[in-house]
Amino acid sequence: MESNNSFVFSSHLPLRNLRSTHHVVDGYNRGMRVLLFDIDGTLISTGGAGGAALREAFRNAFNVVEAADVPFAGRTDRGIGSNLFREHQIEDSETNWTKLRNGYLERLPFHLADRDGRVLDGVATLLEELSKLSQVAVGLLTGNTDRGARIKLSHYELNEHFAFGGFGDEHRHRNDVAKAALQEAEQYLNGNGKLEHVWVIGDTPLDVACARAIDAKVIAVSTGGHTAEELSDAKPDVLLQSLADTERVLELLS
Ligand SMILES: [Mg+2]
């Protein structure tokens, strides 16, 4: 299909969204779909690299022998930091958080290279197919810090697919990340095309909960740390074993 770029969208959108005039007009009339993907357990498994880097950074920055066993899945990095500070009676200040975050970001690439992580089944193909759809805007809704998310996604060559997102640098609760992600999506669309559907795709009950906080629909995938039964209790709109069935997922999301 050819493109003559009749500027229904503003020019800052990636070229892939302008590939087909037909689609652009279609997309405008039908409204835009915004897809907000979680990272860990949904797109990739880092083989524990993120957790290992954060724990090492914590031990190193605060002279701690072993970091307390606080939950990571579905949490924001800022929230995990707060929990660690509380467990170890360390002041939950911005200075201490910055110290922890910097140490973590410094170590993360080494841990990613060191671990046996991977892109989860079907993810690369799905993102490739989604990038061809002009009425679909693909972003992130993650507890990772902005930089941490980009380091992880770059390591697995997925970063180019995500133009915007909500991140866990400041927000201790995932629901607040969801609100930030939605704002970023609206800014990204910049008034071009009505935002019609928002989907959150994630692997924990907290992903389901944060989708509800922004009136989004949600696909839960049991490729992370939670079983299908646990996710089912959270009542997602759709529950999948993985994102491997590209046709099915595209049908749901586009
Ligand atoms: Mg996750």
Image: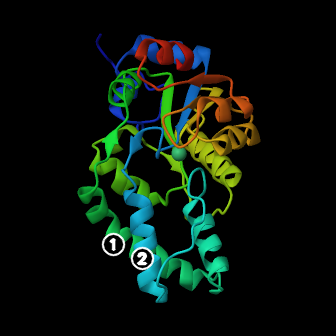
Q: Quadrant of residue 33?
A: top right
Q: Residue type at mark 2? A: Ala
Q: Is mark 2 within 8 Å of ligand 1?
A: no
Q: Which residue bears the numbered disc 1? A: 106
Q: Is mark 1 within 8 Å of ligand 1?
A: no
Q: Which mark is residue 57?
A: 2
| Residue 244 coordinates in the image, percent (x, y) | 41, 22
Q: Which mark is residue 19?
A: none
Seen in the picture, residue 200 relative to 157 is either above or below; the reply is above
Which residue ends up furthest to the left in the rendered image?
A: 113
Residue 29 shows in the view: yes
Query: How many C-alpha atoms fall within 10 Å of the one at disc 2: few (<14), some, or many (≥20)?
Result: many
Residue located 62% across and 86% down the image: 90
Q: Secondary structure at mark 1?
A: helix
For discs 2 and 1, the disc positioned in front in the rendered view: 2
Q: Nearer the viewer, residue 118 or 35?
A: 118
Please name the colour scheme applied to the rendered image: rainbow
Q: Quadrant of the N terminus?
A: top left
The answer to whether mark 2 and mark 1 are in CB contact below 8 A is: yes
